[in-house]
Amino acid sequence: MSEPYVKLEVKNQVGYIEFFHPAHNSLPGNILAELAQTITDAGTNDAIKVIVLKSGKDRTFCAGASFKELININDAATGKIFFSGFANVINAMRKCPKFIIGRIQGKTVGGGVGLAASTDYCMASKYAAIKLSELNIGIGPFVVGPAIERKIGLSGMSQIAIDANSFYPAEWAKQKGLFTHVFESNEELDEAVKATAEHLCTYNPDAMQEMKKVFWQGTDHWDDLLAERAATSGKLVLSEFTKEKLKGFK
């Protein structure tokens, strides 16, 4: 089995940030922290004009948070730290002065949907079905909710949050505004991501930075908001309901 990683590769002024974990690209705290820092660093790297966020292998984009860590939470403080992992990545993406293109090649769950929603331009394959499964284990998509609601609206977000057992197809996500394009294969997806990113590199970086501010207007309070949401999830994960649910994943 491959070791988890976060790596940055720069090609033709495009910074490709790739994360990987052998458990369907689920993300433990240390990988989330490294991902947040890598995004922040890429934002200040003069060799990079546009960023692409992607995950390793050809199947699942991101299975969300690490269940192994989730099961071992025994106090509210640890719970808040755990759920702050995705909050820190979302805030790093929000604050990054460069456009971030999402490359979503397969199914994505929970926090992974939050990552996709936090990109500025998200492209997917037809295999990129999405699901918010948090209510099914007694918590909720509190941390990723603001990012998802910002992209697909409260109606769309509430639909997939309540229907926590269902995967919604990539075309549904495109119709709601999460994905800009859906491609028949990963090969077509990769060609389109590369072409789009490299074309954006011909644009005025200052103009793109100003546009990014416009896109994220009204989110300056998210540092506090997502911290509050992380604390809420950290408390709920200690409930008897959630503890019983999590036993089934051991």
Image: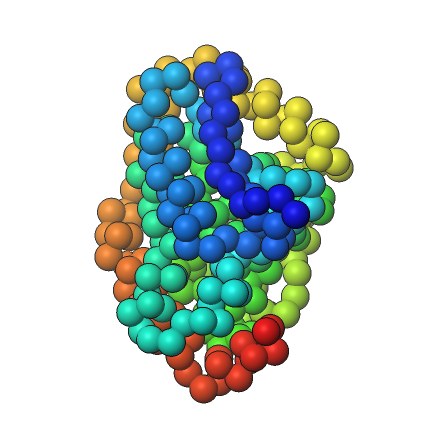
Residue 96 vs residue 172: left or right? left
Up the image or down, 91 lies above or below 72; here it is above
Across and down, in percent, residue 32 comes to 42, 49
Q: Which residue is painted at 42% across and 42% down in the image? A: 35
Of all residues, the one furthest to the right in this rendering is 184
Q: Image check: 135 left or right of 203?
A: right
Q: Position of residue 70 (x, y in %)?
A: 47, 68
Q: Which residue is rendered at x = 31% and y = 38% of the image?
A: 95
Please give the name of the residue rendered at 67% of the width and 32% of the height, measured from the top-left corner.
189
Of residues 151 and 60, the one drawn nearer to the viewer in this rendering: 60
User: Residue 77's quadrant in the figure?
Assistant: bottom left
Residue 91 position, x and y percent, is: 33, 46
User: Does residue 202 appear in the picture of this structure?
Assistant: yes
Q: Is residue 214 above or below residue 135?
A: above
Left or right: where does residue 230 sit relative to residue 241?
left
Task: Indicate the position of residue 59 as horizontal and vertical percent values.
Answer: 69, 46
Q: Indicate whether 245 appears above or below 21.
A: below
Which corner quadrant holds the C terminus? Answer: bottom right
Question: In which quadrant of the rendered view does residue 125 lie?
Answer: top right
